[in-house]
Image (cartoon, rainbow, N blue to C red):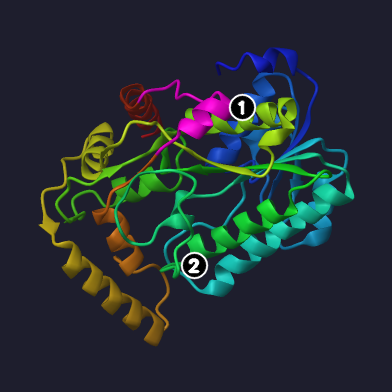
Amino acid sequence: MKNDESITNKSLHKVLVTGGGGFLGGAIVRQLVDRGDDVRSFSRNFYPELAQLGVQQIKGDMVDKTAVEQACKGIELVFHVAAKPGVWGNYADYYPTNVVGTQHVIDACKKHGVLRLVYTSSPSVVFDGMDMEGVDESVPYPEKFHAHYPKTKAMAEQLVIKATGKDLMTITLRPHLIWGPKDNHLVPRIIERAGRLVRVGSGKNLVDTIYIDNAAEAHVLAADRLKKNPKLSGNVYFISQDDPVPLWDLVNDILKTAGHPPVKRAIPRKIAWLMGALFEFVYKTFRIRGEPQITRFLADELATAHWFDIRAARKDLGYAPTVSIKEGLSRLEQWLQNRY
């Protein structure tokens, strides 16, 4: 991790990472441990890998206010990464973890005098179903959300911003499409559907992504810069590779790393959207478990451009991606080969 400030900050922080056993949370934990911080993880499970790193682990759920308070006791800095992701499910599946859980983190920080909070949000909180090309942090929330994940993440984001003050400095980050080795969401979903995937739309829509190590480094940089410059408190930042690529080219590149052929079939966006509406109706009406093959929200995401202006993150946080997409794909291929 190329972070000059990590040298001067070494061994100074007692840090909590919520969701420390997850994909992004685990990457943040590893970078913090590497630079000498005293790290604690709060997750629903125990992770042997974290134990090997000497990380203290507290098991608990974000909806348990007492457990969250216990996790924040004696901590100087919190990375709130834990969340309920996904494009499908009931509102009641998302609200407790994403919204109530975030309020518990805020309350616990204030109760125990934690001065800095870095919150992991998502660019989906501003997605309105249309192309988003080069937009910056001034773009507003949409009038209507088409999935519970972005809606509840937007609600949580607003809680964090509102809580910002003299007793709690915050920064909110919006990483887009995180991928890389140990990915337990995007990469597995693509590989598991190899041979069955169908391109939605023209395939020319550009999207931003972010390699896992870059995403983790951005979080650590945000915490360090917030300590150095409290005026950044309350700010929100998009972070990415700053290298928009055609979405379906990336999908094919990920398939290639696992030895699968590229996606060949395609359907128009409108057809996919109508299919999504039908699937949603059937799943809701008959209370079918699992996730529909397509939803309206997913159809819109797969067919539209969404890439972002990250000049604010470059300027304020000193963020710049250190691992390229090409290098990231090489690392992903090696990891997949070792895994399988």
If the image is split into quadrants, where does the N terminus sit? top right
* Amino acid type assigned to the residue bearing label 1 in the image: Leu
Question: Who's the residue at 33% across and 23% down the image?
Answer: 330
Q: Are marks 1 and 2 in contact (CB under 8 Å)?
A: no
Alpha-carbon neighbours of circle 1 within 10 Å: few (<14), some, or many (≥20)?
Answer: many
Could you say whether the residue bearing mark 1 is in a helix, strand or loop? helix
x, y percentage for residue 67? 80, 55
Question: Who's the residue at 56% across and 66% down the image?
Answer: 94
x, y percentage for residue 294? 29, 66
* Stretch of the chain drawn in magenta: 309-324
* Amino acid type assigned to the residue bearing label 2 in the image: His
If the image is split into quadrants, where does the C terminus sit? top left
Is residue 321 found inside the magenta-colored segment of the image? yes
Alpha-carbon neighbours of circle 2 within 10 Å: few (<14), some, or many (≥20)?
Answer: many
Question: Who's the residue at 31% across and 68% down the image?
Answer: 296
x, y percentage for residue 250? 26, 38
Q: 242 or 137, which is in the foreground? A: 137
- Residue 221's tag is 1
